[in-house]
Amino acid sequence: MLPEFVEIVTWNDYGESHYIGPIDDGGIPPGAAEYVDGYPHEAWLQTLPYQIAAYKHAYDPSSPAPSVAAGEDKIVFWYRLSPASAGTTDATGNDCKSAINTYGYQTCYPMDEVLEDGVFAIVLASASTSPTIAVGGDQASFDGLTAGINFISRPFGGALGEVTVSTGSGVSREGAAIVAEPQSGTANFNAWVGCAGAC
Protein backbone atom coordinates (compact mmCIF):
# COMPACT_ATOMS: atom_id res chain seq x y z
CA MET A 1 0.00 0.00 0.00
CA LEU A 2 1.23 3.46 -0.87
CA PRO A 3 -1.17 6.02 0.58
CA GLU A 4 -0.89 9.56 -0.76
CA PHE A 5 0.53 10.84 2.52
CA VAL A 6 1.94 9.54 5.80
CA GLU A 7 1.39 11.27 9.14
CA ILE A 8 4.04 11.27 11.84
CA VAL A 9 2.50 11.26 15.31
CA THR A 10 3.06 12.72 17.81
CA TRP A 11 5.14 15.78 18.63
CA ASN A 12 4.52 15.93 22.39
CA ASP A 13 2.45 13.04 23.76
CA TYR A 14 4.68 12.67 26.80
CA GLY A 15 1.98 10.87 28.78
CA GLU A 16 2.27 7.93 26.38
CA SER A 17 6.09 8.22 25.98
CA HIS A 18 5.27 8.98 22.34
CA TYR A 19 6.97 12.17 21.15
CA ILE A 20 9.60 13.33 18.69
CA GLY A 21 9.80 16.98 19.74
CA PRO A 22 11.96 18.32 22.55
CA ILE A 23 10.76 17.56 26.07
CA ASP A 24 8.84 20.48 27.60
CA ASP A 25 8.72 19.93 31.36
CA GLY A 26 5.57 22.06 31.58
CA GLY A 27 3.77 19.73 29.17
CA ILE A 28 4.45 16.43 30.93
CA PRO A 29 1.25 15.11 32.57
CA PRO A 30 1.37 14.42 36.32
CA GLY A 31 2.94 11.04 37.03
CA ALA A 32 4.64 10.72 33.64
CA ALA A 33 7.91 12.57 34.37
CA GLU A 34 9.73 9.48 35.64
CA TYR A 35 9.07 7.78 32.30
CA VAL A 36 10.03 10.79 30.16
CA ASP A 37 12.81 12.80 31.84
CA GLY A 38 16.17 11.72 30.46
CA TYR A 39 14.65 9.96 27.45
CA PRO A 40 15.21 12.32 24.48
CA HIS A 41 13.61 11.41 21.14
CA GLU A 42 14.55 14.40 18.92
CA ALA A 43 17.31 12.43 17.17
CA TRP A 44 14.60 10.49 15.30
CA LEU A 45 13.92 13.76 13.45
CA GLN A 46 17.35 13.37 11.80
CA THR A 47 16.09 10.45 9.71
CA LEU A 48 13.00 12.20 8.34
CA PRO A 49 14.44 13.91 5.21
CA TYR A 50 15.79 10.55 4.01
CA GLN A 51 12.67 8.55 4.89
CA ILE A 52 10.45 11.19 3.26
CA ALA A 53 12.57 11.09 0.10
CA ALA A 54 12.47 7.26 0.11
CA TYR A 55 8.68 7.28 0.45
CA LYS A 56 8.20 9.87 -2.30
CA HIS A 57 10.48 7.82 -4.57
CA ALA A 58 8.51 4.63 -3.85
CA TYR A 59 5.24 6.48 -4.48
CA ASP A 60 6.54 8.16 -7.65
CA PRO A 61 9.75 6.68 -9.12
CA SER A 62 10.39 9.93 -11.02
CA SER A 63 10.94 11.60 -7.64
CA PRO A 64 14.64 11.61 -6.58
CA ALA A 65 15.80 8.62 -4.56
CA PRO A 66 17.26 9.44 -1.13
CA SER A 67 20.99 9.91 -0.92
CA VAL A 68 23.43 10.92 1.79
CA ALA A 69 25.93 13.60 0.82
CA ALA A 70 29.60 13.28 1.76
CA GLY A 71 30.11 14.65 5.26
CA GLU A 72 26.47 14.05 6.22
CA ASP A 73 26.99 10.51 7.57
CA LYS A 74 25.15 9.77 10.80
CA ILE A 75 23.80 7.00 12.99
CA VAL A 76 20.50 7.44 14.81
CA PHE A 77 20.23 4.81 17.54
CA TRP A 78 17.76 3.88 20.27
CA TYR A 79 17.24 1.37 23.05
CA ARG A 80 15.70 0.92 26.49
CA LEU A 81 17.95 1.71 29.45
CA SER A 82 17.19 -1.58 31.21
CA PRO A 83 15.99 -5.05 30.19
CA ALA A 84 12.29 -5.55 29.51
CA SER A 85 11.98 -7.79 32.56
CA ALA A 86 13.60 -5.24 34.91
CA GLY A 87 11.69 -3.13 37.39
CA THR A 88 8.42 -3.61 39.17
CA THR A 89 5.05 -3.67 37.47
CA ASP A 90 1.74 -5.11 38.58
CA ALA A 91 0.23 -5.32 35.08
CA THR A 92 -2.24 -2.53 35.82
CA GLY A 93 -2.51 -1.46 32.19
CA ASN A 94 -5.85 -0.20 30.93
CA ASP A 95 -7.26 -3.57 29.93
CA CYS A 96 -5.09 -6.17 31.65
CA LYS A 97 -6.70 -8.23 34.35
CA SER A 98 -4.94 -7.71 37.66
CA ALA A 99 -5.63 -7.39 41.38
CA ILE A 100 -6.40 -3.72 40.76
CA ASN A 101 -8.26 -4.12 37.45
CA THR A 102 -10.42 -7.21 38.05
CA TYR A 103 -12.54 -6.53 34.95
CA GLY A 104 -9.62 -6.34 32.55
CA TYR A 105 -10.31 -8.23 29.35
CA GLN A 106 -6.86 -8.59 27.80
CA THR A 107 -4.33 -11.26 28.64
CA CYS A 108 -1.10 -9.82 29.97
CA TYR A 109 2.25 -11.34 29.03
CA PRO A 110 5.66 -10.95 30.62
CA MET A 111 7.38 -7.99 28.96
CA ASP A 112 10.48 -9.98 28.06
CA GLU A 113 8.22 -12.18 25.88
CA VAL A 114 6.90 -9.12 24.04
CA LEU A 115 9.80 -6.66 23.85
CA GLU A 116 13.24 -7.30 22.39
CA ASP A 117 16.23 -6.25 24.48
CA GLY A 118 18.27 -4.64 21.74
CA VAL A 119 20.03 -1.58 20.39
CA PHE A 120 18.55 -0.43 17.08
CA ALA A 121 20.08 2.00 14.58
CA ILE A 122 19.52 3.69 11.25
CA VAL A 123 22.85 4.27 9.52
CA LEU A 124 22.81 7.06 6.94
CA ALA A 125 25.96 6.55 4.90
CA SER A 126 27.47 8.44 1.97
CA ALA A 127 29.59 5.38 1.09
CA SER A 128 29.83 1.73 2.10
CA THR A 129 30.64 1.36 5.78
CA SER A 130 31.11 -1.18 8.58
CA PRO A 131 29.53 0.20 11.76
CA THR A 132 29.78 -1.23 15.26
CA ILE A 133 27.47 -1.18 18.26
CA ALA A 134 29.08 -1.82 21.65
CA VAL A 135 27.36 -2.37 24.99
CA GLY A 136 29.95 -2.18 27.73
CA GLY A 137 32.86 -4.18 26.32
CA ASP A 138 30.64 -6.37 24.13
CA GLN A 139 30.93 -5.18 20.52
CA ALA A 140 29.04 -6.28 17.40
CA SER A 141 30.19 -5.37 13.88
CA PHE A 142 28.13 -5.03 10.70
CA ASP A 143 29.99 -5.42 7.42
CA GLY A 144 28.94 -4.54 3.90
CA LEU A 145 26.47 -1.72 4.50
CA THR A 146 25.94 0.29 1.34
CA ALA A 147 25.58 4.02 0.76
CA GLY A 148 22.10 5.26 1.71
CA ILE A 149 19.72 4.21 4.47
CA ASN A 150 20.58 1.07 6.44
CA PHE A 151 18.93 -0.50 9.49
CA ILE A 152 20.94 -2.57 11.95
CA SER A 153 20.28 -3.99 15.41
CA ARG A 154 21.87 -6.18 18.02
CA PRO A 155 20.52 -7.77 21.19
CA PHE A 156 22.05 -6.58 24.42
CA GLY A 157 20.93 -9.67 26.34
CA GLY A 158 22.83 -9.60 29.61
CA ALA A 159 25.36 -6.95 28.51
CA LEU A 160 25.34 -3.77 30.61
CA GLY A 161 27.20 -0.46 30.42
CA GLU A 162 27.70 2.46 28.07
CA VAL A 163 26.40 2.08 24.51
CA THR A 164 28.75 3.26 21.77
CA VAL A 165 28.01 3.40 18.06
CA SER A 166 30.61 4.09 15.39
CA THR A 167 31.35 3.76 11.69
CA GLY A 168 34.53 3.10 9.77
CA SER A 169 34.44 6.75 8.63
CA GLY A 170 35.01 8.17 12.11
CA VAL A 171 31.42 8.84 13.20
CA SER A 172 31.13 7.84 16.87
CA ARG A 173 29.01 8.59 19.92
CA GLU A 174 28.49 7.21 23.39
CA GLY A 175 24.92 6.95 24.64
CA ALA A 176 23.34 6.44 28.03
CA ALA A 177 24.32 3.30 29.93
CA ILE A 178 22.15 0.20 30.01
CA VAL A 179 21.67 -0.80 33.65
CA ALA A 180 20.30 -3.93 35.30
CA GLU A 181 17.36 -2.12 36.98
CA PRO A 182 15.65 1.21 36.26
CA GLN A 183 16.81 4.01 38.57
CA SER A 184 13.28 4.57 39.92
CA GLY A 185 12.74 0.83 40.40
CA THR A 186 9.64 1.03 38.16
CA ALA A 187 9.65 -0.70 34.76
CA ASN A 188 10.13 1.83 31.94
CA PHE A 189 9.70 0.79 28.32
CA ASN A 190 10.50 4.22 26.84
CA ALA A 191 13.45 4.53 24.44
CA TRP A 192 16.56 6.64 24.83
CA VAL A 193 17.42 8.04 21.37
CA GLY A 194 20.74 9.51 20.24
CA CYS A 195 22.51 10.62 17.08
CA ALA A 196 26.16 10.37 16.06
CA GLY A 197 27.75 12.31 13.22
CA ALA A 198 26.22 15.19 11.25
CA CYS A 199 23.26 15.68 13.58
Image (cartoon, grey):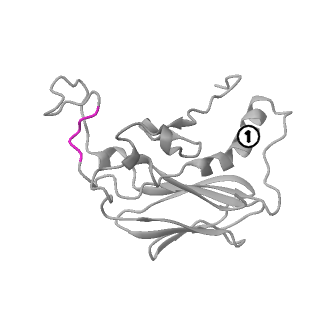
Residue 102 visible in the snapshot = yes
- Report the magenta stretch's main SS: loop
**Which span is picked out in magenta?**
89-93
Identify the secondary structure beneath mark 1: helix
* Of residues 102 and 155, the one drawn nearer to the viewer in this rendering: 102
Queried whether the magenta region covers residue 92, the answer comes back as yes
Specify the farthest residue to the bottom.
137
* Of residues 181 and 84, the one drawn nearer to the viewer in this rendering: 181
Residue 189 visible in the snapshot = no
Q: Quadrant of residue 21?
A: top right
Residue 144 location in percent, x, y? 67, 64
- The image quadrant where one finds the C terminus is bottom right
Queried whether the magenta region covers residue 142, the answer comes back as no
Q: Quadrant of residue 114?
A: top left
The residue under label 1 is: 54
3 with respect to 114 (left or right):
right
159 with respect to 107 (left or right):
right
Task: Count up the numbered dots.
Answer: 1
Q: Quadrant of residue 129?
A: bottom right
- The image quadrant where one finds the N terminus is top right
* Of residues 13 and 50, the one drawn nearer to the viewer in this rendering: 13
- Report the amino acid beneath label 1: Ala
Q: Residue at x 55, y 48 (%)?
A: 41
Q: Residue at x 27, y 56 (%)?
A: 185
Residue 135 location in percent, x, y? 46, 69
Crowding at mark 1 (Cα within 10 Å: few <14, some 14-19, many 20+): many
User: Does residue 154 lie above or below 1 as drawn?
Assistant: below
